[in-house]
Amino acid sequence: MIQNDASKNPPSETKSTPVVVELASLRRRLAGMLYESMLLLGVLVVGFLVPWMFLSSLLDLRDPSVWAGRLKLLYIFVLLGVYFVYSWCRPGQTLAMRTWRLRVVTAEGRNLPWRRASLRYALAWPSVLCFGVGILWAFFDLDNLFLHDRLAGTRVVRLPKG
């Protein structure tokens, strides 16, 4: 069970044992999101730009169609999805979350299964892209959760130092 107390136990690596941890503050989560957006540039360069430049030189893609543009957007969506879902399922943290000592867990304090992580990822897009309504939701939510966390049944918790 997750509580808003100062308990300093990190989530366990087993899926069966819930752990009491402290919910991350809204300020810390927003700072983590800002840092994450900077790190995503590196993910996009390695996962999208470099392969695209290589393929463009091989295939001579000078006149891209509308479908090619949509295919690129789909590729970016899937690329970022793989990055986030894998990070949330395996270590429970993205690179930026490690820096800010944040971790995504279920409402019960367990590691995210891949379906829950995928749901969180899918819900985060409209949460952010609809003028940030899902982010602003946290100011009115009793637990200060983002809308996509509320709907997906996930929580971002703060890990202890060390």
Image: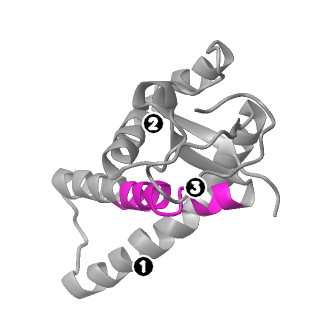
Query: Is residue 84 magenta-colored?
Result: yes
Three-letter code for the amino acid on which mark 1 is drawn? Val
Q: Position of residue 117 (x, y in %)?
A: 40, 46
Q: Earlier in the sequence, mark 3 or mark 2?
A: 3
Q: Earlier in the sequence, mark 1 or mark 3?
A: 3
Q: Position of residue 102 (x, y in %)?
A: 67, 50
Q: Secondary structure at mark 3?
A: loop
Three-letter code for the amino acid on which mark 2 is drawn? Ala
Residue pictured at 53% horizontal, 60% vertical: 13
Q: Position of residue 39 (x, y in %)?
A: 62, 62
67 with respect to 155 (left or right): left
List the residue tagged with mark 2. Answer: 124
Three-letter code for the amino acid on which mark 3 is drawn? Ser
Magenta part mainly helix, strand or loop? helix
Which quadrant of the structure image shows residue 48?
Answer: bottom left
Residue pictured at 56% horizontal, 27% vertical: 146
Residue pictured at 22% horizontal, 80% vertical: 60
Q: Nearer the viewer, residue 67 or 2?
A: 2
Instruction: State which mark lies toward you, 1 or 3.
Output: 3
List the residue tagged with mark 1. Answer: 50
What range is drawn magenta here? 79-98
Relative to 35, does residue 130 appear above or below in the rendering? above
Q: Nearer the viewer, residue 48 or 79?
A: 79
List the residue tagged with mark 3. Answer: 12
Task: Give the alpha-carbon distance from disc 3 to disc 2, as whole Å.
Answer: 25 Å
Q: Residue furthest front?
A: 17
Q: Residue furthest bottom?
A: 58
The answer to whether marks 1 and 2 mark residues whose Cβ atoms lie closer than 8 Å is no
Q: Nearer the viewer, residue 52 or 135?
A: 135
Relative to 90, does residue 154 appear above or below in the rendering? above
Task: Give the alpha-carbon distance from disc 1 to disc 3, as whole Å.
Answer: 37 Å
